Image (cartoon, coloured by chain):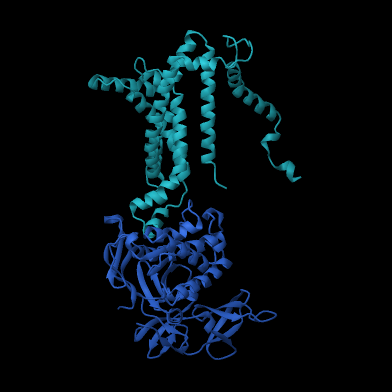
Chain colours: A blue, B cyan
C-alpha cells in the first residue's frame, strides 16, 4: 500500500485556445501524504485553486494525471470521487436545514436512514453545532456556516478533504479560532486535508507541509520551518515572512557584499558555487550592535506594538529592515541619521539560487 | 438639528393630499363596480337596493358558463406552457457565469413587455391565418399559443428574481457530495426554483385570463373568452350581470396576487 494520498503527475491546465490561451497550471508534480495537513500557498492567480479543482474533479487537466490512493482518477466525475470540498462561499443549500445539509452526502451515497441520522449527530457534535440542527443556513452567522460546511464535507468520510480558502470571509479573531478548530478536526479525523490559502501566516501555523506556488508552478515543498528558514528562491523568501536581500560575490562560504564587508553565509538548495549572488536574511535575525558587523545608517523607525522596525541603509544604498523588540518604556533609542552596526549569527544569511 | 436636515418626502406640502387622491382614483371605480354588482335593479347607475340576484343570473347564462370555461382552459394551458419555458430561460440566464450578450437575451425574452400588444396581435393574426390555410386546424391551439407567448415574461421575471444572486457553486457542491446530474436537479435546482415558478405560474394565469387585445385578433368565430364576451355585452347594453362577473374575477385575482406576494417576499 502506498503512503501517498493524492499525486499529481506533470499536471497541466490551459484555459482557452490559440492566442487567448492562459496556462493556469504548467506541469505540476506533487505527492501529498496520507493523513497530512498540506497547504497550497501562493498569491491569487498562482494556480492553487485550479489544482484543487482538478483533484475535486470540477475541471479536467489539459495534460498529466491525478492519482488518489494510487489509482488514476484524472477523468472521473466529481460525484464518484471519495473527495469532498469546503467551498470559499460555503455553498450551503439554502432550502435545507443544517442537519439536512450535513446528511446530503451520505444520502446521495445511498446510506441507510439510521446510519445517516447517526452520522449527522456525530458531525454536529464534532463541530459543536448540536443546538443548530434545525436552523436554515440563512439564520446562521459566518462562523457557524463555516462549521456546517466543514461538517457537511466530512460527513461522507472522504479520503481527502479539500479546503478552498475557507477562512477568508471571517474576521481576524474568528479566523484564529477556526485555524485551531481545523487543525483539531484534522488530527481527530485523521483525514488528509489539502488547504488552499494566500495567507502565509495561516499556512505556517496549521500545515504539516506547505507547497508554495507562483504563476502556475510549484516553487518549493517542505515543512513550515524549512520553507521559512531555507527559502528556495527570492519569491518564497519575500512571500513567506519578510526578507532583506543583499547582493555580493560568493567565494567558498564567504560572500563579499557590494557594500564592502565580507560575511560567512549558508548556501541554500541549488545555490551557485561562486560568483555574483543574492542572499536573504530575516529582519528578526539581525541585531543592532555598537561595533563590529556591517556599518549602516538609521533612516527611520516604525513602531508596531510588540515590535519596532528599524530601516537602515548600507554604504551602497541597500535598505535593511531590522525587527527589534519594543522596550517596556521609551523608544528603541535609534534616531534617523545615527550610525549603527548590524550583526547576525553565521547561518542566518542564506544564499539563493540564481533567478531563472 | 439632525432631524430637520434629513430629507423625508412625506413631509413635503401636499404629500397626503396627492397620496389620498391617487388611491381614491385607483380604487373608487372598482369599489363602485363591486357595490353595483349587488344592485337589485337593472341599472348600473341607480341604486335600487341590495340583492344577490346577478350572481345566480350570470351563472345560469349558458353563454357566460361557456366563455368562462374557455378562458380558464386557455389560461391554465398558457400558464403551464409559459412557466415551463420561463423556468428554463431563467435557469439558463442565472445558473451560470454572466456572458457577453446577456442583456440582449434579457431583452429578447421580455420582448412582449415592450412591443405594443396591437402589433403582436396583428402579427399573430397574419402568421396564424397562414397556418390555418395550410393545415385547416381551427381549434383553441392558436389562442393557447398566443397567450403562452405573451405570458413568458410575466412568468420569467419572478423566477429570475428568485434565482438571481444565489450561489453558483450550489450545483457543484451537490456533485461534490455524490449527487449525479438528475439528483442535483431534483434535490438542489428544482427546490430552489419552485417558489419562483409557482409565483410565475399565477402571474401568467392572471395575465392570460384578462387579455383582450391579442385575443380579439387571434380568436376564430365562437371562441370568445370571458373578457371579449364582456366587452361585446357592454357594447350592446350595459348589463349588471357583467358587474357580477367582474367582481368574481377581481376576487380571483386578489387571491392569486396575495398568494404571489406571500411566495415572493424575502424570507426573514
The single residue placed furthest to the left in the displayed view is: B134
Q: Nearer the viewer, residue A38 or B243?
A: B243
Residue A315 in the image: x percent, y percent? 51, 81
Q: Nearer the viewer, residue B218 or A217?
A: B218
Residue B62 in the image: x percent, y percent? 43, 15
The single residue placed furthest to the front in the displayed view is: A114
Quarter of the image containing the C terminus of chain A?
Answer: bottom left
Is B211 on the left or on the right of A54, as rendered?
Answer: right
Residue B248 in the image: x percent, y percent? 52, 23
Q: Nearer the viewer, residue A291 or A208?
A: A208
Asked where in the image residue A330 lies, by quadrant, the reply is bottom right
The total of numbered circles placed on residues is: 0
Q: Is residue A288 above or below residue B178?
A: below
Asked where in the image residue B119 lies, by quadrant, the reply is top left
Q: Is residue A180 above or below residue A279?
A: above
At a point 36% along the width and 19% down the height, the residue shown is B219
Residue A109 in the image: x percent, y percent? 37, 60
Q: Nearer the viewer, residue A172 or A123?
A: A123
Amino acid at each position: 500500500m502506498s503512503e501517498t494520498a493524492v499525486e499529481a503527475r506533470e499536471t497541466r491546465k490551459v484555459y482557452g485556445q490559440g492566442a487567448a490561451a492562459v496556462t493556469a497550471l504548467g506541469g505540476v508534480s506533487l505527492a501529498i501524504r496520507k493523513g497530512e495537513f498540506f497547504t497550497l500557498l501562493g498569491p491569487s492567480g498562482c494556480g492553487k485553486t485550479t489544482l484543487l479543482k482538478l483533484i475535486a474533479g470540477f475541471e479536467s487537466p489539459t495534460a498529466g494525471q491525478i492519482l488518489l490512493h494510487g489509482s488514476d482518477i484524472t477523468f472521473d466525475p466529481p460525484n464518484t470521487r471519495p473527495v469532498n470540498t469546503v467551498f470559499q462561499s460555503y455553498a450551503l443549500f439554502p432550502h435545507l436545514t443544517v442537519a439536512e445539509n450535513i446528511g446530503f452526502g451520505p444520502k446521495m451515497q445511498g446510506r441507510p436512514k439510521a446510519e445517516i441520522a447517526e452520522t449527522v449527530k456525530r458531525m454536529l457534535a464534532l463541530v459543536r453545532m448540536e443546538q443548530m440542527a434545525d436552523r436554515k443556513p440563512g439564520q446562521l452567522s459566518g462562523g457557524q456556516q463555516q462549521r456546517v460546511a466543514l461538517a457537511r464535507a466530512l460527513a461522507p468520510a472522504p479520503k481527502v478533504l479539500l479546503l478552498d480558502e475557507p477562512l477568508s470571509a471571517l474576521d481576524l479573531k474568528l479566523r484564529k479560532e477556526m485555524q485551531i478548530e481545523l487543525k483539531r478536526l484534522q488530527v481527530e479525523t485523521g483525514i488528509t486535508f489539502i488547504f488552499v490559502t494566500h495567507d502565509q501566516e495561516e499556512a505556517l501555523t496549521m500545515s504539516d507541509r506547505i507547497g508554495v506556488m507562483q504563476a502556475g508552478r510549484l516553487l518549493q515543498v517542505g515543512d513550515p520551518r524549512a520553507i521559512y528558514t531555507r527559502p528556495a528562491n527570492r519569491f518564497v523568501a519575500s512571500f513567506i515572512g519578510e526578507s532583506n536581500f543583499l547582493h555580493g560575490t560568493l567565494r567558498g562560504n564567504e560572500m563579499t557584499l557590494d557594500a564592502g564587508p565580507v560575511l560567512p553565509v549558508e548556501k541554500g538548495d541549488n545555490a551557485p558555487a561562486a560568483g555574483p549572488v543574492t542572499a536573504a536574511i530575516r529582519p528578526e535575525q539581525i541585531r543592532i550592535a555598537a561595533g563590529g558587523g556591517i556599518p549602516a545608517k538609521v533612516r527611520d523607525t516604525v513602531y508596531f506594538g510588540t515590535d519596532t522596525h528599524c530601516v537602515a541603509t548600507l554604504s551602497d544604498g541597500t535598505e535593511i529592515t531590522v525587527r527589534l523588540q519594543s522596550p517596556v518604556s521609551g523608544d528603541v533609542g535609534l534616531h534617523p541619521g545615527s550610525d549603527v552596526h548590524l550583526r547576525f549569527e553565521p547561518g542566518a544569511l542564506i544564499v539563493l539560487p540564481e533567478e531563472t | 438639528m439632525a432631524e430637520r436636515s434629513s430629507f423625508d418626502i412625506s413631509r413635503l406640502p401636499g404629500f397626503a393630499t396627492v397620496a389620498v387622491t391617487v388611491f381614491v382614483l385607483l380604487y373608487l371605480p372598482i369599489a363602485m363596480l363591486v357595490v353595483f354588482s349587488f344592485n337589485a335593479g337593472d341599472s348600473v347607475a341607480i341604486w335600487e337596493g341590495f340583492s344577490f340576484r346577478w350572481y345566480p343570473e350570470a351563472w345560469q347564462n349558458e353563454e357566460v358558463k361557456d366563455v368562462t370555461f374557455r378562458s380558464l382552459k386557455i389560461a391554465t394551458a398558457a400558464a403551464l406552457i409559459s412557466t415551463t419555458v420561463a423556468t428554463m430561460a431563467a435557469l439558463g440566464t442565472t445558473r451560470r457565469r454572466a456572458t457577453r450578450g446577456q442583456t440582449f437575451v434579457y431583452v429578447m425574452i421580455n420582448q412582449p413587455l415592450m412591443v405594443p400588444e396591437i402589433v403582436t396581435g396583428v402579427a399573430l393574426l397574419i402568421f396564424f391565418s397562414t397556418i390555418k390555410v395550410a393545415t385547416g386546424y381551427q381549434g383553441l391551439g392558436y389562442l393557447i399559443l398566443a397567450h403562452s407567448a405573451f405570458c413568458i415574461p410575466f412568468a420569467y421575471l419572478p423566477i429570475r428574481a428568485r434565482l438571481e444572486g444565489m450561489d453558483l457553486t450550489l450545483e457543484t457542491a451537490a456533485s461534490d457530495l455524490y449527487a449525479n446530474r438528475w439528483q442535483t436537479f431534483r434535490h438542489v435546482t428544482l427546490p430552489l426554483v419552485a417558489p419562483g415558478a409557482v409565483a410565475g405560474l399565477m402571474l401568467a394565469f392572471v395575465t392570460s385570463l384578462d387579455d383582450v387585445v391579442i385575443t380579439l385578433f387571434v380568436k376564430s368565430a365562437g371562441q370568445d373568452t370571458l373578457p371579449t364576451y364582456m366587452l361585446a355585452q357592454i357594447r350592446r347594453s350595459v348589463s349588471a350581470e357583467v358587474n357580477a362577473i367582474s367582481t368574481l374575477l377581481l376576487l380571483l385575482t386578489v387571491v392569486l396576487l396575495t398568494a404571489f406576494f406571500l411566495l415572493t417576499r424575502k424570507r426573514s
